Image: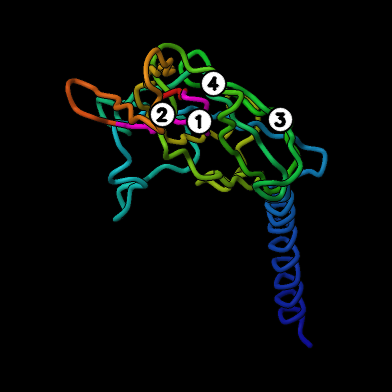
Amino acid sequence: MTKKSILSSLLSILTAIVILVALRPFTTVSSQENQASSDATYDIVLTLVKLKDLNGWPKGGGKDSYSGQPLDIENYFGSEASTIDGVAFDIHKDKADGELVQTKITENGGRLIFSGLKAGKYYIVVNKEKSKLAGDQMLGDTTPVPLEVELPVTKPDGSYFTVGNDAVHVYPKQVLKQREDKTSFKVRKEWKGKKLNSITVHLKQNGQVIDEIELNDSNNWEHTF
């Protein structure tokens, strides 16, 4: 083999080594960045959005670009959208009726934070019994379905939402209705003349009969509407 051939072979080997050395660190770093630490914890920031109705939700047809980032409520949900304070949410591990991890109530703009959560699947569910809505409003018949979140949540750039200002945000939607004021009326028949076998009492609202009851010995001649 000539000196020229030996020199050419050595240069080829050195070039291959340099390329491998240059590539190796980048491959290792990429693998580590995409692996969540088993000791890491995550936050979920929930904001409860009040809508007039739920028609058109969830968004479809490619219009929904939400991926976990904070949203401007009016810009995203519409000018009539607002937030709701006083609604309690439970967060459960693994399934909707699984281990209860935390219970929080929305405040200061319909927000609450579930913090210190380990990696895994969680379900967020409305707790009507612990909700404390102010005024004459109450939760509508349609409540947000259990919201499923699997932590960590990946950002569009491939990194993870974490905690604090870098936490993932979720926006369940709710319709409210007016609380109905209810009262009761008790009626009792007291006989001062000839006693009949029964009588019928009509309950009217604005001149229209809305209920009726037959009073007799079996109900002790009394009833509460």
* Residue 162 versus residue 122 in the image, above or below: above
Identity of the amino acid at label 3? Gln
Task: Out of 107 and 20, give the one closest to the viewer.
Answer: 107
Of mark 2 and mark 4, the one earlier in the sequence is 2
Say which residue label 2 marks.
Answer: 49
Identity of the amino acid at label 1? Asp
Say which residue label 3 marks.
Answer: 102
* Residue 80 versus residue 141 in the image, above or below: above
Asked whether the viewer can see residue 184, the reply is no
**Which one is closest to the eye, mark 2 or mark 1?**
1
- For the residue labelled by badge 3, is the local secondary structure a helix, a strand or a loop? strand
Place of residue 86 in the rendered image (x, y in percent of width and height, measured from the top left)? 52, 18
Q: Quadrant of the N terminus?
A: bottom right
Mark 2 to mark 3 CA distance (whole Å):
21 Å
Mark 3 to mark 4 CA distance (whole Å):
13 Å
Range covered by the magenta-colored residues: 211-221
Q: How many marks?
A: 4
Mark 2 to mark 1 CA distance (whole Å):
54 Å
- For the residue labelled by badge 2, is the local secondary structure a helix, a strand or a loop? strand
